[in-house]
């Protein structure tokens, strides 16, 4: 694994270079496109092992949170290198498990939002004016997609209640963050991941965001197994367990995955500080979460 590849902001060009390098070095790693963003940027899915019984890791829901994409690709690199070399991870031989367990990774759910945050409103292409106006000319804090919809407010998990709460907080139109759109799955990015989950066989899912060093688990009343898994993830990471409220609850991918599919879902808020977290934070974040990511794959 060449860690220097992971030390710059993860725009489309850099992400493509990282993924291309992984595919070249690991022939057992597969890539497909599950959909496209509003600006026709591909939403990639990278998989190893048994696709019919896999764990889903998804990152890059928000424009400022591109460090989560770097975390996913670095862990995938580490895991694939271990498999190729026949090595162990925390006493486990992952290569021996691939016939019965797979890992599916969506490195960047919201590629337009990432480009806008890093490169400015022009990256929104035909939506440039909308983004420019919604951001008041400053896209450094852009989290939404190119249409000003927060992807993690756009899933059908008590969406109506969240939409009302957004309105009560003055969020009624395209915005850099927290506007849930006109209806659940109004955006191609949320439809792509929801369609994948409806058609797939994922045992559980982790959504990666930044920041806060917290783990959100379940939705509504969490299942016993969800609670046990959450405790295990918290124990090995040192992150605290939390149940979000207000505008942070409902409408999210993890919420929908738990409510709609009835399976375990987790939101991992990586790192601590102010978004976008600097790339220099990646190494200590990865060192702290490597065991948790391995455990999440094996659960």
Image: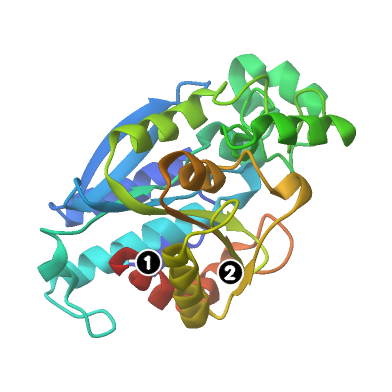
- Residue 169 lies, in percent from the top left, at 88, 37
**Would you identify the image quadrant in which residue 228 lies?**
bottom left
Q: Which residue is mark 1?
A: 296
Q: Is residue 52 above or below residue 296?
A: above
Question: The residue tagged with tag 2: helix, strand or loop?
Answer: helix
Q: Left or right? Give the position of 272 relative to 86.
A: right
Q: Left or right? Give the position of 256 relative to 30.
A: right
Mark 2 and mark 1: span between their CA atoms? Answer: 24 Å
Sort mark 2 into few (<14), some (14-19) or many (20+) by Cα contacts within 10 Å.
Answer: few
Task: Look at the image and tell me in which quarter the C terminus lies.
Answer: bottom left
Q: Which residue is mark 2?
A: 280
Q: Residue at x 51, y 36 (%)?
A: 111
- Residue 163 lies, in percent from the top left, at 74, 30
- Residue 188 lies, in percent from the top left, at 49, 23
Q: Is residue 46 above or below residue 282?
A: above
In this view, the residue farthest toward the top is 126
Q: Left or right? Give the position of 256 relative to 263.
A: right
Viewer-closest of 126 and 71: 71
Task: Look at the image and tell me in which quarter the N terminus lies.
Answer: bottom left
């Amino acid at each position: 694994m060449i860690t220097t590849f992971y030390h710059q902001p993860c725009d489309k060009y850099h992400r493509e270079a990282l993924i291309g390098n992984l595919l070249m070095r690991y022939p057992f790693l597969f890539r497909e496109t599950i959909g496209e963003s509003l600006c026709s940027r591909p939403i990639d899915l990278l998989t190893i092992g048994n696709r019919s019984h896999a764990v889903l890791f998804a990152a890059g829901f928000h424009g400022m949170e591109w460090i989560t994409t770097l975390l996913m690709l670095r862990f995938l690199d580490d895991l694939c290198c271990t498999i190729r070399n026949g090595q162990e991870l925390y006493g486990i031989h992952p290569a021996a498990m691939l016939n019965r367990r797979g890992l599916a990774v969506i490195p960047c759910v919201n590629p337009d939002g990432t480009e806008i945050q890093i490169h400015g409103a022009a990256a929104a292409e035909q939506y440039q004016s909308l983004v420019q106006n919604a951001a008041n000319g400053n896209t450094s804090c852009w989290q939404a997609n190119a249409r000003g919809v927060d992807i993690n407010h756009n899933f059908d998990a008590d969406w109506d209640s969240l939409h009302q709460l957004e309105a009560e907080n003055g969020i009624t139109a395209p915005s850099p963050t927290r506007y849930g759109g006109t209806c659940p799955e109004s955006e191609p990015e949320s439809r792509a991941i929801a369609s994948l989950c409806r058609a797939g066989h994922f045992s559980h899912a982790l959504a990666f965001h930044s920041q806060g060093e917290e783990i959100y688990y379940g939705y509504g009343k969490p299942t016993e197994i969800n609670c046990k898994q959450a405790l295990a993830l918290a124990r090995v990471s040192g992150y605290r367990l939390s149940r979000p409220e207000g505008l942070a609850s409902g409408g999210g991918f993890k919420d929908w995955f738990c409510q709609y599919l009835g399976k375990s879902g987790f939101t991992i808020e990586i790192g601590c500080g102010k978004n976008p977290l600097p790339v220099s934070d990646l190494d200590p974040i990865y060192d702290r979460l490597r065991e948790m990511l391995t455990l999440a794959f094996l659960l």
